[in-house]
Image: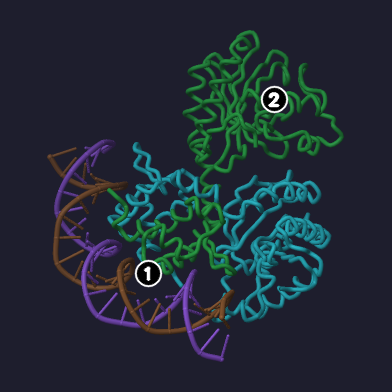
Chain colours: A green, B cyan, C purple, D brown
DNA sequence: AACTGTAGTTGTGTTCAGCGCAACCCGCGC
DNA sequence: GCGCGGGTTGCGCTGAACACAACTACAGTT
């Protein structure tokens, strides 16, 4: 059971040593320190780290000879994360649909627009799907609001030069200032509701999904007709946020200080 | 040099197998598949994966018995690489994309290969993303050229023993001498353009990023289709170089005597 | 310059764990 | 039932990981 008594396990101990607190405070560890943490002979540690380095799992500062976790690990997580999200999301979407009775989507941000990548239609959907692959503007949709949750006023200005927003639905924000205000509210709540901002009669609520670095990589959102869904928007928001947090966890994001913005 | 003939290296091969294309398309691999990719006996693979799993480096789907990248990798990834660079780079990338209209990347050198760490897709990209986490050879890419900018002839010889280079695109350099010559030209210019060295129809240009010691730690590069981007390569090079210098400054490097090599 | 200490690499004989192979287990479908 | 693909376990044999020590490199100190 214990991984200690296999050469692989011992070798990986070196890698895990680089995850320790000491490695964090000075951004790298020397061979002797790693040997001490892993409880192994320095000679073997030197050899083992050479192997890890040759695979890119650790990087070495040629100046100080310190080792730290390599870029390759970062890349692995980044690549695996995308795929992981796509496989982990469908059951979550189904669960939301089952619980809320409205259509649920997974969206990402591409080129300033919100792209819906997955959608799970509700049983009582008026119109049958057609959402997947669709692009909608970010400023007047709940998913867009969630995806922009970490953008401050300056970042929004950069996104919409001149402060003017493209046209949207009846209740869409008219300028960047208004958009920033609504985003701030959503940030406080942890979820982003919209009502008739894209189309008349359409309401929705969304929550952001973060990757291992805390960056917002996608959003979960549920939309429905105003007459049926409006009254449950807030409760739905809580639930969607929980679901989004669960997906974030699966991507390696520790959802502890949920209220704190980046 | 080669990591293959150590137990640790072989065991890690299992982990890296989960990074292969096959693993990414369906987010998980069975024992036999991993064994095939790593070229090892399935029995040993079964045992090896068990220890990797006990350390959290791989996760197992109890249903399908498939292995996937584990939670621990995501946790480690959060502290991998240079965090200052990772936070400073995205806005710069976005700026480049906005100005040049082509896809921009941040790359580093790992284990002799160029690893794309971040990429910001252009609005008119044919295919969205997919680049992040990809590894390409150093000798026939603009990013590789930039990352090798400080390598003199001797250092290159050491990197490619025998003077032979791995195969590349149509215009790739054929031997170390040719590579050294192109690097020398790039050093003079301050940026490294390549045309159809990796793939036909693909052109790119890159510039190096230095840390506070002046060591090249990363490269900024922009790539696009030949028909659209070729004519602007030189102007783009100037701009990319400026952006890279700005990042270098943020890392503490005083960019005054630009022509001087380390 | 010699002395001392610290960090890291490399050499070596011994032993133990990883190796390939094969047998075995389990669920599935013809 | 039988065969089959996927996974685990048992077992002799051999080679690589082990501890220890010798060695290099470099930075202060007197």
Up-down: is B9 above or below A93? Answer: below
- Residue B150 coordinates in the image, percent (x, y): 68, 72
Chain under disc 2: A
Tag 2, which secondary structure?
A: loop
Residue at image location 48% in from the left, 52% down from the top: A19
Residue at image location 66% in from the left, 52% down from the top: B84
Few, some or many residues within 10 Å of mark 1 (<14, 14–19, 20+): few
- Residue A10 coordinates in the image, percent (x, y): 35, 58
Q: Is residue D1 left or right of residue B59?
A: left
A140 or B37: nearer the eye?
A140
- Residue B253 coordinates in the image, percent (x, y): 73, 62
Chain under disc 1: B
Q: Which mark is residue B5?
A: 1
Q: Which mark is residue B21?
A: none
Tag 1, which secondary structure?
A: loop
Q: Mark 2 points at which residue?
A: A141
Residue B261, quarter of the rendered image: bottom right
Up-down: is A122 above or below B38? Answer: above
Residue at image location 33% in from the left, 61% down from the top: A7
- Residue B69 coordinates in the image, percent (x, y): 45, 47
Residue B173, quarter of the rendered image: bottom right
Mark 1 near mark 2, Cβ–Cβ under 8 Å? no
Residue at image location 80% in from the left, 72% down from the top: B259
Q: In this view, does B171 lie to the left or right of D22?
A: right
Whether labels 1 and 2 belong to a single chain: the reply is no
Tell me how far mark 1 sits from mark 2, CA to CA: 55 Å
């Amino acid at each position: 059971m214990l991984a200690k008594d296999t050469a692989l396990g011992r070798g990986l101990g070196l890698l895990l040593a680089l995850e320790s607190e000491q490695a964090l405070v000075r951004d790298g560890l020397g061979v002797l320190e790693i040997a001490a943490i892993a409880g192994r002979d320095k000679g073997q540690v030197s050899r083992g780290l050479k192997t890890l380095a040759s695979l890119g799992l650790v990087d070495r500062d040629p100046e100080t000879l310190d080792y730290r976790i390599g870029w390759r690990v970062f890349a692995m997580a980044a690549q695996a994360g995308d795929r992981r999200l796509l496989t982990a999301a469908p059951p979550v979407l189904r669960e939301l649909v089952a619980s809320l009775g409205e259509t649920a989507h997974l969206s990402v941000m591409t080129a300033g627009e919100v792209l819906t990548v997955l959608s799970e239609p509700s049983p009582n959907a008026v119109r049958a799907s057609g959402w997947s692959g669709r692009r909608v503007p970010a400023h007047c949709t709940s998913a867009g609001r969630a995806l922009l949750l970490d953008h401050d006023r300056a970042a929004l200005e950069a996104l919409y030069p001149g402060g003017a927003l493209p046209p949207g639905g009846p209740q869409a924000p008219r300028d960047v200032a208004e958009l920033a205000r609504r985003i701030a509210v959503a940030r406080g709540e942890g979820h982003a509701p919209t009502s008739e901002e894209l189309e008349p009669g359409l309401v929705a609520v969304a929550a952001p999904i973060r990757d291992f670095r805390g960056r917002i990589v996608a959003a979960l959102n549920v939309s429905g007709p105003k007459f049926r869904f409006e009254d449950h928007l807030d409760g739905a928001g809580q639930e969607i946020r929980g679901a989004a947090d669960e997906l974030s966890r699966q991507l390696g994001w520790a959802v502890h200080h949920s209220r704190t913005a980046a």
